[in-house]
Image (spheres, helix red, strand yellow):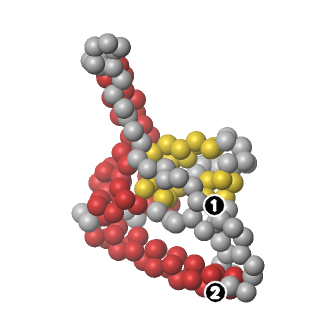
Amino acid sequence: ADVSLATVRALGRCECRVIDYRHLKPLLKSYPAEEEFFKSLATGRKLNLEMAQQQQQAKPRRSSQTHSSLGASSFAAQTTPGTGIRPYSRRKNQTTKMHLLVTQNETLLGNVDFFSGCHPDFLKRLAPCLEIKTFEEGDDIIREGDEGYLMYLLKS
């Protein structure tokens, strides 16, 4: 099998959901079937990468750039200037937006074949962990050689 590493670049403005393995790992401890599924995927991917690296050893290497971590989204509290107090309406609005986003994420996860065998409670607990990442035309989404601790859900 010809396995190659590749850079994925946005052809236009693109919004995707990102799952950080550092958020997924603790959740998997409560769901052994899902943990085994993801471990088998990681093992297979690791073997494929090792094969690809062996195939590419004879080829000249391109310099690779590393990207900064996308990390966890920060929902910093906004305050009324000079008071240090967040207005209730703003908190309520943020809570409503977060609830809507989590609901959308649950629906998204339920419609992705990759997650079709996962327990519904697992998906419900995973939904708040999804982060939104927006890429502009020409942005690298994934760069060849980057460490793979993020999973991207892209809608074409």
According to the picture, the residue beneath numbered tag 1 turns out to be 65
Cα separation, mark 2 vs mark 1, equals 21 Å
Question: Residue at image x 65%, y 65%?
Answer: 64
In percent of width and height, residue 30 lies at 24, 63
Question: In the rendered view, would you say 8 is above or below 3?
Answer: above
For residue 145, side relative to residue 2 (left or right):
left
Q: Residues within 10 Å of mark 2 (few under 14, many from 20)?
A: few
Choose the circle earlier in sequence order: 2 or 1: 2
Question: Residue at image x 43%, y 56%?
Answer: 20
For residue 18, side relative to residue 9 (left or right):
left
According to the picture, the residue beneath numbered tag 2 turns out to be 54
Q: Nearer the viewer, residue 52 or 78?
A: 78
For residue 72, side relative to residue 29 (left or right):
right
Question: Residue at image x 36%, y 32%?
Answer: 76
Q: Amino acid at mark 1?
A: Gln
In percent of width and height, residue 23 lies at 35, 56
The answer to whether marks 2 and 1 mark residues whose Cβ atoms lie closer than 8 Å is no
Q: Nearer the viewer, residue 20 or 154?
A: 20
